[in-house]
Amino acid sequence: MLTVLYHPCLDRIGDRALLPELDGGGAVPLSRGEPVFAPPGRPGGEPLADEHLSRKPLRLLPAADGGVRLELGSSSTTVVVHGRRLQSAAHFSAAQLRRGVVLELGHRVVLLLHASASQQDLIAGTCMPGEERELIGDSDGLRQLLWEVRSVADIELPVLIRGENGSGKELVARAIHQASPRRGRPFVAINLSAIPPTLASSELFGTERASFSGAVHQKGYFEQAHGGTLFLDEIGDAPLDLQVALLRVLETGEVQRTGAQVRKVDVRVIAATDADLEAKVATGTFRAPLLNRLSAYEISVPPLRTRRDDLGRLLVRFLHEELERVGEMHRLAPPAPEDKLWLPSSLVARLAEYEWPGNIRQLRNVVRQLVIGSRGRDRLELTPAVERLLAEPSSEGAELPEDDSPARHAGRPLTRPEPAAPAPPSGQIASAPPSEADAASHSTRRSPADVTEDELADALHASRWNRAAAAKRLGITRPSIYVLIERYPRFRTARDLTIEEITRCYRECDGDLERMVERLEVSEEALAGRVRDLGLGQGAASARRDAAVVRRG
C-alpha cells in the first residue's frame, strides 16, 4: 500500500493506493498519472496529478524475500529516501515495509510504502461512530483500537487502557464514554500522579465539614462523576492505601467521605497506565486484586511509530489548530504550481522518519514550535530545538536503502554518515534485511517510562555523557535519552551552559576537552561545538583529536 503523507493539496493527505499487483508478482507504476489514490474505504479516486512529477513512471516490483524493489527507469522524478537521493534503484526489505518506507517525490509529495490489511478490512474498519473520530487516523492499529472501543463501550465493565506516554490514552477513554449510554453524563478525568498521597483519599471520596481541622464540605471525584465515567490516569502511581479503597469501591459501588456515611455511586471506572503493573505486583507496589478488577477488559493504544501512515493526518490537524491560534490560516491555502511550498516536503519526510518517543503529544508540541518559530515567514522553518530533535538517528529499523549506484545527499541526512560498504557487482542490488539479533534487540527494548533518574545518572556517567552509549546501556532508543534528560532537572545539555561557565571552565582546564566534559557533565561532541562557536575551538579541537587517538589506540 501507498499512503499520502503530504501533498500540496492538503485534502489528498491520507489517500491510499492499494497494490495487490505486488502480492501477485506484478509491477506497479508510480507517476503523475498512476496509480489511483482514494480516501480509505471509498471507491474511485484520482492520481497524484502534481506537475512536478514525471509522466514516465517509477516501478515498484516484488522481491523474492518479501520486500519491494523500486526502479527509477527513465523517470525524471526526484526520489529521496531517508535523506538521500536515489540514482537508479533500491531494495526495501519486508522488515522495512512493516515499519514503513518514506518516499519523497519531486520535492512536493511524500508517500509511505508499507504493509497493511486487506481491502475488505480497510472498508469495514472505517465504519465507526462520529464521536470516536477525535482519534485521528486510519492505520491498522487505530482501526483495531476503534473496533475495541465500540465493542466495549456499552458493556458496564471497568476498562484498563495501556499505552506509552503521550499516545492518547485519555482520548480513548473519552471515546469509550461518548460511545456508551453514559455519554450525556459527566466525564471526570484525574491524574493520580499529580495528587499528593496525603490528599488522594479526600480528593477521590470527598470530605465533610469539620471532619478534621480545616475540613470543608467537598464532593469527591467519584460523586462528581455519578451517572457517568471516572477516568483514573497513571493508576500505577496510586498509593497502596488508596488502592485498597479503590478496590472496595469497584466491588461495592460505595464511597465514604471523610467524616460521613457510606453512600452509593453509579460510576464506570476507566484506568490508564504506561507502567508494567504486573512487575509492580511482583514487587509489592501494586495490588493484584485491584489489577484483576481494573482489567476486566484491556485496550492497548499503539504508539505513533507503529502507525506512521497516520502522521500526515495528525500533522495537518495540529497545523490547523496552531495556525488558527496565531492568525495565519492562509498558510494552508493550495499553492500555485510555480510557488514554493510553505510546508516543505523534506520536513514532512523527516517528521515521518522520526521515532516519536513522546508519541502524539510530542508531535503536537513540535508542530506548535514550528508554527510559532516561523510566524510571518514565507516558509516553515526548523527552530534549533526541532533541528536538534530530528538530527538524531532513527533507531527502529531505519536502514538506508541499498542502491546500485552511489547515493547523493539531497538535504541533511537523518543519520550520521557511516563508512561506505563495498559496492555490489554492476547491475545488482545489495540487500541487507535486519539480522535476527537486531530484531531481538528491538523486541526487548525498554520503555523510557521505566528508566529511573538514578539509572539514567549511572548510565550517563559510565558513558561519559555520550548519549548514544547511554541509551544502549539502558536499552532505550537514542531519541528517548533526550526526553529523559529534559524530564529530570539535575541533568543538563551543552546548550544549557552559559558563555561565562564554558569560558571559565575552558581557561581552568587549559582547553582540555576531556577534563571539561568531566567537570560540566555534558556530551563531548556538543561541548566541542559550543567551544568552537565561542572562538575557543583551536585548543579544544586539538585536545579532542588527541583524546580520539588515545581512545582508538
Image (cartoon, rainbow, N blue to C red):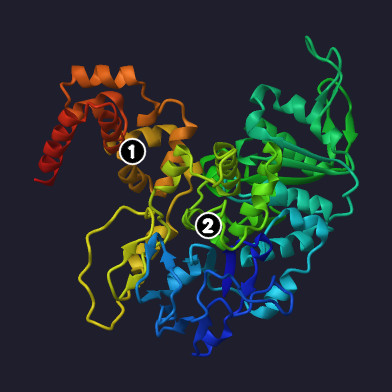
The residue tagged 2 is 305
Classify the position of the C terminus by image quarter: top left
Q: Is residue 201 left or right of residue 339?
A: right
The residue at the far front in this view is 338
Q: Is residue 412 left or right of residue 336?
A: left
Question: Is residue 97 or residue 257 the one in the foreground?
Answer: 97
Q: Is residue 527 left or right of residue 213?
A: left
Q: In the image, is residue 119 above or below residue 360?
A: below
Q: Position of residue 288 (x, y in %)?
A: 63, 46
Q: Position of residue 446 (x, y in %)?
A: 45, 50
**Residue located 85% across and 55% down the image:** 180
Q: In the image, is residue 251 above or below residue 72?
A: above
Q: Quadrant of residue 7?
A: bottom right
Secondary structure at numbered mark 2: helix
Question: Is residue 145 or residue 134 the one in the foreground?
Answer: 134
Which of the two labelled residues, at mark 1 and mark 2, occupies the earlier sequence position?
2
Q: Quadrant of residue 156?
A: bottom right
**Residue located 42% across and 65% down the image:** 81
Q: Is residue 436 left or right of residue 143?
A: left
- Crowding at dot 2, Cα within 10 Å, few <14 / some 14-19 / many 20+, comes out as many
**Residue located 61% across and 79% down the image:** 18
Instruction: Tell me the tag on residue 459.
Output: 1
